[in-house]
Image (spheres, rainbow, N blue to C red):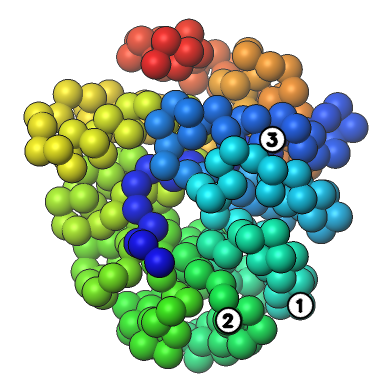
Amino acid sequence: MSKIKGIYAASMSILDNNLTLNIDKTIKHSEKIIDQGCHGVAIFGSTGQAQLISVSEKISLLNHLSESRYKDKYLIGTGSNSLSETINLMKISSSLNFNNFLIMPPAYYKYGDKEVLEFYSRIIDSIPESKIILYNFEKLCGYKFSISCVEELVKKFPDQIVGVKDSSYNLYENLKIENFSVLPGSELKLLKGLELGCEGIITATCNVTAAISRKVYDDFINKKSQTVNELLCNVRGVFDQFDLISGLHAFMSDEDSAYKNILPPLSLLNTKDKKKLLEELNKLNFTLNSLKAA
């Protein structure tokens, strides 16, 4: 397969007022940000509240997603600590011709590299056709991939372990594996990562920065001068002052009230914080209207 590269959003999940997954709006949202510039999106990543959404809703969305005009542009997350649920959801995805996955090790429990190797080995033994982007985010799962662990996984499964999303930022500067995609988890690392040989990014805020992230990427690839990287980094810096999921849903809720729906224990920004978020973004001339213009 070709390397996974470019601008990827960890796509948001849109909920109805009763907090069930709105499949149609969730898919339309993901298609919209691809139209705005993303090379693809990750469905059911942490930004998509994956750990909080039921398996049955995930399966239903996958069935409808298989009819999307962009079905070849999706990375599928599982958002489950359960090995069996992870494997079962991946098998269903594969049956629908989704074979590219973004998989984080289980949260909550303490373990090391040996156990991580066992976790991914069992997945791949069950679904050898899968192509897996490792998800390195110690803040969420309590485990941080080492360079040696990633190298061992790639050595053992060169056809299945094809990349890493690095949100702990201990890999992207030093991990060098041939035909392997390294994608930092923040726009702040996009340009530096590209200069170091990374393949792009997978980030939460690409739900709203798709157009300018894509321009930074394209200008680098085409060896053009950078004109919007400062804006991109400043926008990400504003969102980084808040919980990203809360901030994104608060920002987008002025476009569609469905974005106000969020699964507990997550919550929207309070009135004061939303006001600060919008004020800081307005100073950068970054608004919902500017997204539509892009």
Name the residue that disc number 3 marks.
Answer: 26
Report, in whole angstroms, how far the alpha carbon at label 1 lies from the one at label 3. Answer: 25 Å
Report, in whole angstroms, how far the alpha carbon at label 1 lies from the one at label 2. Answer: 15 Å
In this rendering, the answer to whether 38 lies above or below 127 is: above
Mark 3 secondary-structure assignment? helix
* Mark 3 nearby-residue class (10 Å; few <14, some 14–19, many ≥20): many
Report, in whole angstroms, how far the alpha carbon at label 2 lies from the one at label 3. Answer: 29 Å
* Mark 1 nearby-residue class (10 Å; few <14, some 14–19, many ≥20): few
Name the residue that disc number 1 marks.
Answer: 84
Q: At x 15% / y 51%, what residue is drawn? A: 195
Give residue 93's position: percent from left, percent from top. Answer: 69, 62
* Mark 2 nearby-residue class (10 Å; few <14, some 14–19, many ≥20): some
Nearest the viewer among 288 and 217 is 217
Q: At x 17% / y 24%, what residue is drawn? A: 227
Instruction: Determine the image quadrant of residue 183.
Output: bottom left
Name the residue that disc number 2 marks.
Answer: 128
Mark 2 secondary-structure assignment? loop
Amino acid tagged 3: Thr
| Sequence-first tag of 1 and 2 | 1
